[in-house]
Image: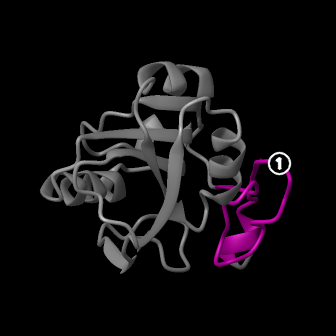
Amino acid sequence: MAAEISHDYRGKEILAVGLLTGCIMFQMNLLKYLTVPYKIDFIEVSSYGSGTTSSGNVKMKKDLSKDPNNQHILITEDLIDTGRTLKFISKYFTDKKCSSFKIACLLSKKARRVNDLKVDYCGFDCPDEFVVGYGMDFAGHYRCLPFVGVLKEEAFSGK
């Protein structure tokens, strides 16, 4: 993925925008292999709360610290589920008059997609299961696992 991104952005500088907090491990491991210059920034949005399904209501919790105007934005995301959050972010950056806007994700859960979101770079397709680890969490837990695993239903259903 890093080679493809580096090829696509040769001669340009990227503003790599991570979606907190799940992106951290994926973003750092991706960026260390880029061969083009980049700056790093973060935003935080939420549509999950403490549940296992998206609420559909996307809220901006932390905005960029850098001006995205005329920047080549590369969003780094751990998992794309319904696509609502990324559609929200796509519109946000379109309104900011960026030079370009692309999305890189580790996992894409196409079975749950509710829109026509274009994902430019994708590591893996993800089954329709709730996954944790490698930065992804359930209610703040399991984020530190060094792998991606399916969370057993009894962990979140109270059974």
Q: Which residues are magenta?
A: 131-157
Q: Identify the image quadrant of residue 127.
A: top right
- In the foreground, 116 or 91: 91
Residue 73 rendering spot, x and y as whole percentages? 36, 46
Return the residue nearer the eye: 70 or 1.
Answer: 70
Q: Residue at x 67, y 67 (%)?
A: 137
For residue 50, side relative to residue 95 (left or right): right
| Residue 57 horizontal side relative to residue 19, left or right | left
Horizontally, residue 54 falls left or right of residue 52, namely left
Residue 87 within the segment the image draws in magenta? no
Is 26 situated above or below 139? above
User: What residue would you read off at disc 1?
Assistant: 147
Q: Residue at x 42, y 65 (%)?
A: 54
Query: Which coloring applies here?
Result: one colour
Examine the rendered structure and indicate whether residue 122 appears above or below residue 76: above
Mark 1, secondary structure of its residue: loop
To which quarter of the image does residue 107 belong?
Answer: top right
The spot of residue 46 in percent (x, y) is 42, 73
Q: Is residue 133 in the magenta section?
A: yes
- Tell me the kind of residue under disc 1: Phe
Q: Is residue 78 visible?
A: yes
